[in-house]
Image: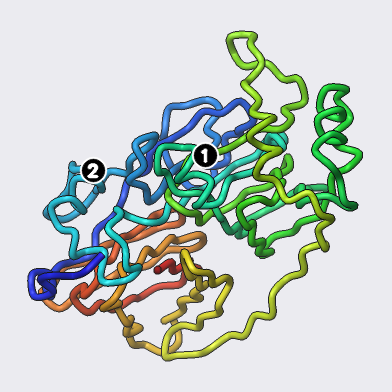
Amino acid sequence: MTNKNTSLNLNCKPFLLKPAAKDYLWGGNRLNEDFAKNIQMEPLAETWECSTHPDGVSMVASGEFSGMDLKQVLTLHPEFLGTHPDSDRELPILIKFIDARKDLSVQVHPDDEYARIHENGSLGKTEMWYVLDATKDAKLVYGFHHDVTKETLRDSIEKGVLEKHLQKVPIKKNDVFFIEAGTVHAIGAGALIAEIQENSNLTYRMYDYDRVDKNGKKRELHVEKALEVANLKSSKEPKQPMRVLRFKKGYATELLSRCQYFQVERMLLNTEICREMAQFQTGSNSFQVLLCTKGCGVMYWEDGGMINFYKGDCMFLPANSIPIKLHGKAQILKVEC
């Protein structure tokens, strides 16, 4: 998106977001227990923390736009998105918390080209997972441990033995996984995840363990579409990326993931010993989203404005946002495009 009037938002300010929520049958209650979401939904499987997708739009919870949804704000102020990515689309990403009390379905997402042609111009879905917590035996599905064919998979799905082909990977707290479109995958029971993805809700289910929903019906499968887009080659077991901490006054950062759709860094904020607030660099060519995954703190800016943030809070910083300072002890995922 081209920023035609950068001067309009030189003094714009960050704001808190309130998520949309999903009660998928595999969800648990940790998003209320661990993140104090106070959402009356059982189960509470996902919270869409930063979203303009029509299936779940985040609301603005502070500042002059409080009470509006994020899509409305960005329609009024498209310059908040910045000049990158170079696109006429709306917010290009979607950020979630996911609590998997049970296994998610085995699924796959299409890439942009397939989605554009077959799903009314939608975006595809490449995503990244950051593991916030995991039980001792938690695993995820990541591709196949050997090459397969469409015929083999179709037959395995019909017979209920697809799992014998799937590569299952143990996971632990602080792991990072990049899930490229076309990769057959599933989050396993016991995982608490922060997910950063393209702004898409396209999911093709291959297998759902013959489960039924609260109405006693099996969820829809999308086997033929899944077979069209899935990578059928064996997948190498994903390895954790090299992560290097870079220290600044009051905080440290490390790059978790970077691709053509988003960049994700982990910030470790600790101003307890430096006695000064951390100077935070806002973006000129991209909005930024700060997702607090641990601890709490305060965000300040020069006219006396401030936001208190806590574990589970999500903040949107428009491109060319007013300079801010941070104080506190927290872990934050910083997302930009």
280 and 294: which is toward the camera: 280
Q: In the image, what residue occupies the spot 83% across and 50% down?
A: 144
Residue 2: % across, % down: 22, 69
Residue 21: % across, % down: 43, 35
> In the drawing, does residue 273 fall left or right of residue 308?
right
**Whether residue 101 is situated above or below residue 199 in the rendered picture:** above
Residue 199: % across, % down: 42, 50
Q: In the image, what residue occupies the spot 87% across and 30% down?
A: 156
Residue that numbered label 2 is attached to:
69
Is any atom of residue 298 visible in this view? no
Q: In the image, what residue occupies the spot 27% across and 58% down?
A: 88
Residue 233: % across, % down: 81, 54
Residue that numbered label 1 is attached to:
202
Q: How many marks?
A: 2
| Disc 1 versus disc 2: nearer the observer | 1
- Alpha carbon of mark 1 to alpha carbon of mark 2: how far? 22 Å
